[in-house]
Image (cartoon, helix red, strand yellow):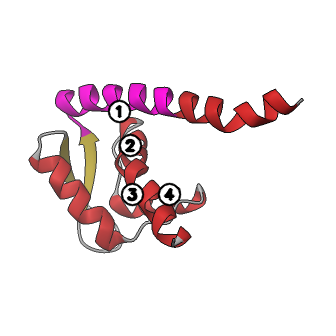
Amino acid sequence: MNIDNTQSQMRKGILEFCILSIIKRGEAYPGDIVEEMKAAGLQILEGTLYPLLTRLKNAEMLTYKWVESKGGPPRKYFSLTPIGEEFYQKLEQTWVELANGVNQLSNKETTTNN
C-alpha cells in the first residue's frame, strides 16, 4: 500500500474546507491563499487552486472583484456569497464531527491501555 497516495487523498478531502476558511475571513487573493496554506504546512499549487476557485465561483459559492495593483496587472479577490457561507457552515459542522470522531477513535487505545 502506498502511504503517499493515502496522504494525498486525505489532503484533497480537506482542501476545499481550508480554502473556504481563508476566504471566509475576508476577501482573498489566490497568491495569498497559497502562501497562507504553505505557512500552515499545507502545500497547494496554483494549478490546483485556480480550477477549484473557478468551480466554486461557477457553483455561486464565491464571487470576485478586480482590484488594481501598484506593481502589475489587476488582481482578482474572492469572497464568499450567501450560498458559500451556508455551504461553509455545513462543511465546518462536518469537519468538527469528523475530527471529534477520529480523535476519539485514534486516542481510544491510549486511554484504554492506561
Tag 1 residue: 91
Residue sitting nearer the eye, 75 or 51: 51
Q: Residue at x 24, y 72 (%)?
A: 73
How far apart are labels 4 and 2 at the CA level?
12 Å
Q: Residues within 10 Å of mark 2 (few under 14, many from 20)?
A: some
Q: Residues within 10 Å of mark 1 (few under 14, many from 20)?
A: some
* Residue 87 falls within the magenta-colored stretch: yes
Q: Residue at x 53, y 60 (%)?
A: 42
Of mark 2 and mark 1, the one earlier in the sequence is 2
- The amino acid pointed to by label 1 is Leu
- The amino acid pointed to by label 2 is Phe
Q: Please, is residue 8 above or below residue 40 in the view?
A: below
Secondary structure under the numbered disc 2 in the rendered image: helix
Tag 4 residue: 37
Task: Please give the range of residues in magenta.
Answer: 80-98
Secondary structure under the numbered disc 4 in the rendered image: helix
- The amino acid pointed to by label 3 is Lys
